[in-house]
Image (cartoon, coloured by chain):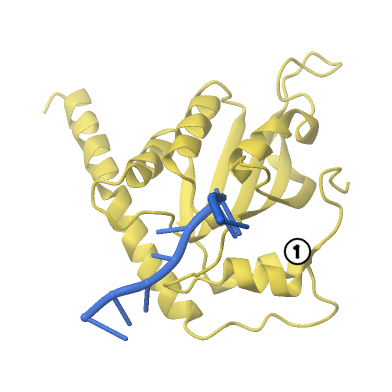
Chain colours: A yellow, B blue
DNA sequence: ATTTTCAAT
């Protein structure tokens, strides 16, 4: 099934420009979100839809995605004809990590929608340089809400190129520094999410009465 | 050494 949002594939140049994980990403005043939606049926996950979105008219792309969710995941609320509530798994690949406001909105939404699983891959970290940035806290909140956030690696770019880009048999050609930048950002994200782990551990110890 | 960021001109 082709998404009603954007049946057109992403242009090669746009993909490369916006997903390039360089340290000083000048002029990326847009954010792209490539998504794959799977429907969970018993133990199986069936591919259901895919596509990409871009932020528009002051609305961040994550919120735009939420706005279209009802159309993208029929039966996510309520139930189908057999009276069964449907479960979905969504994986998205975003050129920027979410801002704090979007993280809050997403966490809030997901906590009220347990039949939806979300996995987020990001190419670059948005405003995460300062130790006490609200963006960092937002990412931790997402993690606590059960979202798996990961920095994109070569295989993820390769997959996106294959899936979302109008590539016409052109193979994915990694840019200089892709690997190093990915490793650097993954370490950074790891350190950002670390306090989250220790909190979880403390909770676990408390539960065990230690 | 320093550079940027879901714009605003």
Residue A75 sits in quarter: top right
In which quadrant will I find the C terminus of chain A?
top left
Could you tell me which residue is drawn at 47 percent across and 56 percent down? Answer: A150
Residue A195 sits in quarter: top left
Residue A127 in percent (x, y) is at: 38, 54
Q: Secondary structure at mark 1?
A: helix
Front one among A182 and A30 = A30
Could you tell me which residue is drawn at 77 percent across and 50 percent down? Answer: A50
Determine whether, in the image, residue A73 is placed left or right of residue A28.
right
Front one among B7 and A155 = B7
Determine whether, in the image, residue A117 is placed left or right of residue A138.
right
Determine whether, in the image, residue A7 is placed left or right of residue A31.
right
Q: Disc 1 is attached to a residue of which chain?
A: A
- Name the outermost residue toward the left: A210
Residue A56 in percent (x, y) is at: 68, 45
Residue A191 visible here = yes
Residue A156 visible here = no
Could you tell me which residue is drawn at 37 percent across and 45 percent down? Answer: A135
Front one among A44 and A69 = A69
């Amino acid at each position: 099934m082709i998404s009603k949002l954007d049946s057109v594939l992403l242009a090669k140049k746009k993909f490369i420009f916006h997903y390039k994980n360089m340290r000083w990403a000048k002029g990326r005043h847009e954010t792209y979100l490539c998504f794959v939606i799977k429907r969970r049926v018993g133990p199986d996950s069936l591919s259901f839809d895919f596509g990409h979105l871009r932020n528009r008219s002051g609305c961040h792309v994550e919120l735009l995605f939420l706005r279209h969710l009802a159309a993208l995941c029929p039966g996510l609320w309520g139930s189908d004809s057999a009276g069964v509530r449907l479960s979905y798994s969504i994986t998205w690949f975003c050129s920027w990590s979410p801002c704090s406001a979007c993280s809050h909105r997403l966490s809030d939404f997901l906590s009220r929608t347990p039949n939806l699983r979300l996995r987020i891959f990001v190419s670059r970290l948005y405003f995460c340089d300062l130790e006490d940035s609200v963006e960092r806290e937002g990412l931790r909140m997402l993690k606590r809400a059960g979202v798996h956030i990961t920095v994109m690696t070569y295989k993820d770019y390769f997959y996106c190129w294959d899936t979302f880009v109008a590539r016409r048999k052109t193979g994915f050609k990694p840019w200089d520094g892709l690997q190093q930048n990915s490793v650097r950002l993954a370490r950074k994200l790891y350190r950002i999410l670390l306090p989250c782990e220790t909190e979880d551990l403390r909770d676990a110890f408390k539960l065990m009465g230690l």
